[in-house]
Image: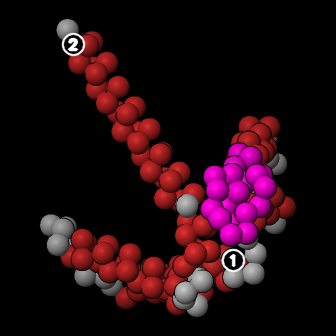
Amino acid sequence: MQNQGVLQSNKRNLTILIAAFAAVYVFWGSTYLAIKYAIETLPPFLMAGSRFVFAGAILLIWARFSKDYEPPKPVHWKTSFIVGTLLLLGGNGGVVFAEYYISSSLAALLVATEPFWIVLLSWLWLGRSRPNLKTILGIAVGFFGVWLLISGQPAKDSANVGSMQ
């Protein structure tokens, strides 16, 4: 009897895990196409900034009303500024600006090369260990998956599955 409860709990956890992955795939995967459409009506950095100000406001309100809320200390503001500048302005801002000139599928493909660059530069510059076969295969499979999704005929005026603008 007890094993049946464990089995049901495992099935429930698996369902939640699959749903979480599906949400990540849909929301994260559609980001590049959404950016492409959004920058048709807003300047790239205004669009990106608005997106993160809105998300940050929601998180701040949620945190403020949580029972464990502590006001941010100066060190939190400092690290937030550094992360915001490097990651959001440099990383996401760069993608948004680039999508003004290139297709969203090419932008997604270029961003998919990040794991490759991180592993390579960590090995060459930071003296970390040489990438093993699992790491290389993982990067190759991930990159191939993104390429497979966007390798359809490019669509200039429509958003078809397999050919993001």
Residue at x 73%, y 63% (from the top left corner): 155
Q: Which SS class for mark 1?
A: loop
Q: Which residue extends farthest top?
A: 1
Residue 70: x percent and y percent? 23, 76
Q: Main secondary structure of the magenta part?
A: loop
Q: Which residue extends farthest front?
A: 157
Residue at x 49%, y 59% (from the top left corner): 27
Rendered position, 137 above or below 124: above
Q: Which residue is mark 2?
A: 2
The three-letter code of the residue at mark 2 reads Gln
Which quarter of the picture shows residue 163? Answer: bottom right
Task: Specify start and end residues of the magenta stretch as a single range.
Answer: 145-165
Rendered position, 17 above or below 70: above
Upstream in the sequence, badge 2 or badge 1?
Answer: 2
Q: Is residue 140 left or right of residue 47?
A: right
- Residue 68's tag is none
Q: Is residue 123 left or right of residue 67?
A: right
Q: Which residue extends farthest right?
A: 124
Q: Which residue is mark 1?
A: 99
Residue 159: x percent and y percent? 63, 62
Q: Tell me, yes or no, if residue 137 can be seen here.
A: yes
Which quarter of the picture shows residue 7? Answer: top left
Spatial distance from mark 2 to mark 1, Cα to Cα?
54 Å
In the image, 71 versus 116, the foreground residue is 116
Please, which colouring scheme is shown?
secondary structure
Q: Tell me, yes or no, if residue 127 can be seen here.
A: no
Q: Quadrant of the N terminus?
A: top left
Residue 76: x percent and y percent? 39, 81
